[in-house]
Amino acid sequence: MPLTGPSLGHLRILLVEDSPEDAELMCEQMLEAGLEASFERVETSAELREALLRFAPDIVLSDLAMPGFSGNQALEIVRGWHPDVPFIFVSGTIGEENAVAALHQGANDYIIKHQPARLPSAVARAVRESRGTIDRQRVEAELMRAQRLESLSLLAAGLSHDLRNILQPLLIMPELLKARTDDPHLHHLADVIAECGRRGHEMAESMLSFVRGSRNPSERIQIAHLFEAMELLLRSNLPPKVSLHLEVAEPTLAVDANYTELQQVLLNLALNAIQAMPSGGRLSLRAFGERDLQGQEWLHLSVADEGVGMNAEVLSHLFNPFFTTKPNGTGLGLVSCKRIIEGAQGSIRVDSSPGVGTRFDLLLPMRALPAEVAPLELPVAAGTGQSILVVDGEATRLSLLGNALSSQGYHLQLASDGGAALRWMQQEAMPALVIADAGAKLLSASHLLREMAALGYRGPALVLEEADVTVSRARFPAGISVHVLRKPLEMQQVFRSVAEALAG
Ligand code: ADP
Ligand code: MG
């Protein structure tokens, strides 16, 4: 009987068999059926151990009972050496109970001697299955590693961003401290703090740029090629009852994306689908082109299974990092899919019903869209000496604001209460902008602004509002255009608002 299926290559087959004639017969059967193989025969535990190391068999065929040695002992030794090497009992007398016991013990199959038509195909199947398991484990381990790395870089990006914000005061405050004292010892301490802040800031910066730098470049990907690779990867790893169907609508279908990332996305989804079908079913991957109403062309990819599906509870947590319903799950697969797809300006959607199956739909722009303009990190418009009057009862924030805005090229006048601000306005000059804290002592911001309007001030004002108290807009004077900024303050936001208020 000729063997079907792709070639297994050259196999090393180890026979545990006390009868040389029986062994000879089995070898002939396998060679005649078209297996390419070399054979060794052993009949004691010592010989078996030695052959496992030296011969490193792809599969072990063992008799059940031999003088002084048993098939069960052989199985135990083989499993101890390599848990994934297939092991088949071949016996003249195997009964139903023995067969069941053998499978329980971890044998892959059993075959009755002298009825050997099954032998070659059983060997081929056992080798294929074990290779499939090993490949699948390798792909899974590789995917898990990729998912961990992916989430690590997410974490690092978030962390370094927060760190930069936290460290910001450390860059500004030491200068303010030094301005308040002549004590050389305190000056030295302030310098030490500033230096630490600067180094921390640098570290956060370089961590962020490292993470950003690891973003992978785009290339033109032929979907037909991608699907061929997917088929190769998946086909050999499919559990027996899962069937694979791939369909590319047009052979020329292509997309601008990163190949490795896109392949990782499809593998994550396909693996989830396979894991969702423990009792088998269809796994379908489809690709086709779509055009939206704006004429933009999209690549539509779908990964569908006939598995257990998901209830509303699972669906609602699906894209949360570390959410998993599997004992060995990472809960990172879908998070990284989403991040990759959205990073390529696409979108990911899921349809699922319990007991019926699940379909993930991905939409990717066929041609990379012009990158969204990143929000500017630097001040939009640096000052050109415009004077700004800051009224704030909180000394730290007053100094911080003053210092930060001076560094942007504005000319600052600081007042710690409304009275001082009004006096300065009356005696010195009208500023180009007033920044007032809503909770300024003695005078409320709206009251203060009305007093300023009465003195003839017609410039803009920026009112700093508490996070939990909304200032009543109605009580601001009509002649002053008021912008409101909510606390806690973020310096870049302050710079932007100042520039906008001055421009408007
Ligand atoms: P993991 O596979 O490690 O659990 P994922 O982020 O890939 O992590 O998936 C998260 C969870 O989403 C899974 O544990 C599972 O409950 C659910 N899930 C994902 N894909 C499917 C699917 N095709 N069918 C059913 N459930 C799924
Ligand atoms: Mg997964």
Image: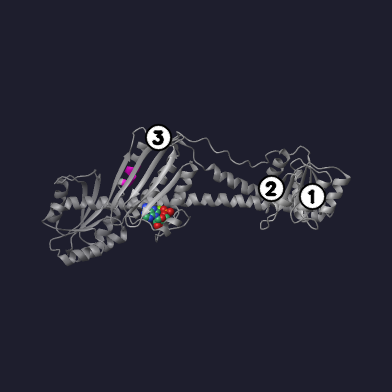
Q: Position of residue 230 (x, y in %)?
A: 35, 43
The correct choice, above or below, for 310 with respect to 501 in the image is below
- Please name the residue that numbered disc 3 is placed on: 254
Q: Choose top left, top right, bottom left or bottom right for residue 34.
A: top left
- Front one among 58 and 151: 151
Q: Main secondary structure of the magenta part?
A: helix
Q: Which residues are magenta?
A: 230-234
Q: Nearer the viewer, mark 3 or mark 1?
A: 1
On residue 450, the disc is: 1
Q: Amino acid at mark 3?
A: Ala
The correct choice, above or below, for 449 with respect to 253 in the image is below
Cα distance in 3D space between marks 2 and 1: 27 Å
On residue 491, the disc is: 2
Residue 233 falls within the magenta-colored stretch = yes
Residue 397 falls within the magenta-colored stretch = no
Cα distance in 3D space between marks 3 and 1: 63 Å
As helix, strand or loop, the secondary structure at mark 2 comes to helix
Q: Choose top left, top right, bottom left or bottom right for residue 185.
A: bottom right
Q: Residues within 10 Å of mark 2 (few under 14, many from 20)?
A: some
Q: Residues within 10 Å of mark 1 (few under 14, many from 20)?
A: some
Whether residue 15 is visible to the viewer of this picture, yes or no, is yes
Q: Amino acid at mark 2?
A: Met
